[in-house]
Amino acid sequence: MKIGIVGGTGDIGEGMARRLSSRYDVVLGSREAEKAHTTSECTIGLLKQRGLKSSCTGVSNQEAVDAAGVIILAVPFLHLESTLSGLSGFEGKIVVSPVNPMEKKDFFIPVPPPEGSAALLVKKLLPGARVVTAFNTIAANRWKDLDAEIDVAVPVCSDDPDAKSVVMGIVNGTSKMKAYDAGPLAVSSMVESLTPLFINVARYNKMRDVGIKFV
Amino acid sequence: MKIGIVGGTGDIGEGMARRLSSRYDVVLGSREAEKAHTTSECTIGLLKQRGLKSSCTGVSNQEAVDAAGVIILAVPFLHLESTLSGLSGFEGKIVVSPVNPMEKKDFFIPVPPPEGSAALLVKKLLPGARVVTAFNTIAANRWKDLDAEIDVAVPVCSDDPDAKSVVMGIVNGTSKMKAYDAGPLAVSSMVESLTPLFINVARYNKMRDVGIKFV
């Protein structure tokens, strides 16, 4: 399976490539293909040092969309709309949104768009795409630190049962993540609200990169 | 310490009395004092069977407010405003809101009031009360089932540091709950959004009474 990462040279995207490219063919996209190429080479080198194979190719964001059947939007909410407006060809593809619309005041709070959530905005912007909410609560540091397993719950939302099932499979095959069906996209705002809550909890309780388990 | 439970004969209130009355003096309130008395006697009997002491008294909701320094509002959001409008004397007292404003459609979703959250509504309705959000995510069955420990995370919000500290102490002394400072009341809507998410997760993944741990 080919997984494209739009925004693959950001902190989250880079971490995702490290975890996913030992199991899937990762097509890492960036606004600058050259930067994507460098990140891709680093990823392969890093995994090689650990005796792991890595299938990772650095390309432009559009080439990542074109090449992959599953595309992860590893971009901050602030750049989501502008990034997607410059890309095309998402029809029929699985598009994963780990995006959390939030603001930092004295504390972090969710700031959903008028559509209700980032995932619902993606659905509006990319008609025909099979949108899935997943990976929202996993901090960049956790993705990147290959010395530690990521042993957390990952709530997954989608209106497309097959797309949801594919993404839950990817989640369950990545480190020690455990996928939970959290319902349709209509409830994705609750999943997107977890991250600002976790950042606050981390800050007020002197913790780092808080995740959850369902018990 | 005396803990008053407004709505103490409901499912959640009854469960809270079982857990809290072995450690604190519980004043269990109800619209009907006679019903509160019965629930209180049951609670004492139930704990006695297990060789545990229980300090529990059944009274009216108003008497529970008058008697206690910490008052838990164990009422559904639907009845929150009408219940509080019939009560007085909250000034200076710690008032705990475990209330989650939510609706059931095909799935559960948060439906916060215009104030932003149930806790902020309580703060508006009870000027002078020291409002704390806590215990939101603990299902009635978990409170009631004394055969099982409640080994979950409990996010706590308040604008009053001392009140927050008192409530975090109660949380940490109850079964195996672990209190986490989640920030001021302004972020309580995130905590109140957890329960509808958890109910959906339970339903879609064939689980029961889902709680969380922070990891």
Image: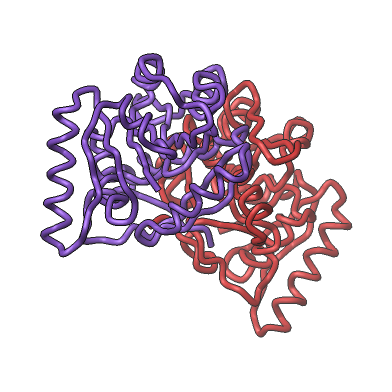
Chain colours: A purple, B red
Q: Is residue A196 visible?
A: no
Report the residue at 73% width, 83% height from top. Answer: B49
* Left or right placement of residue B32 versus residue A173 in this view: right
Rendered position, B184 above or below A151: above
Report the residue at 57% width, 26% height from top. Answer: B116
Q: Is residue A49 visible?
A: yes
Where's residue B134, x and y in %? 54, 47
Query: For this rendering, which residue is in front, A94 or B99?
Result: A94
Rendered position, B90 above or below B205: above
Where's residue B155, x and y in %? 48, 48
Query: For this rendering, which residue is in front, A87 or A199?
Result: A87
* Left or right placement of residue A194 versus residue B209 in this view: left
Report the residue at 88% width, 57% height from top. Answer: B34
Where's residue B192, x and y in %? 58, 40
Quarter of the view holding residue B112:
top right
Question: In the displayed image of the protein, which residue is found farthest to the front?
Answer: A67
Rendered position, B46 above or below B115: below
Where's residue B45, x and y in %? 77, 77
* Left or right placement of residue B137 versus residue B65 in this view: left
Rendered position, A81 above or below B194: above
Report the residue at 80% width, 70% height from top. Answer: B42
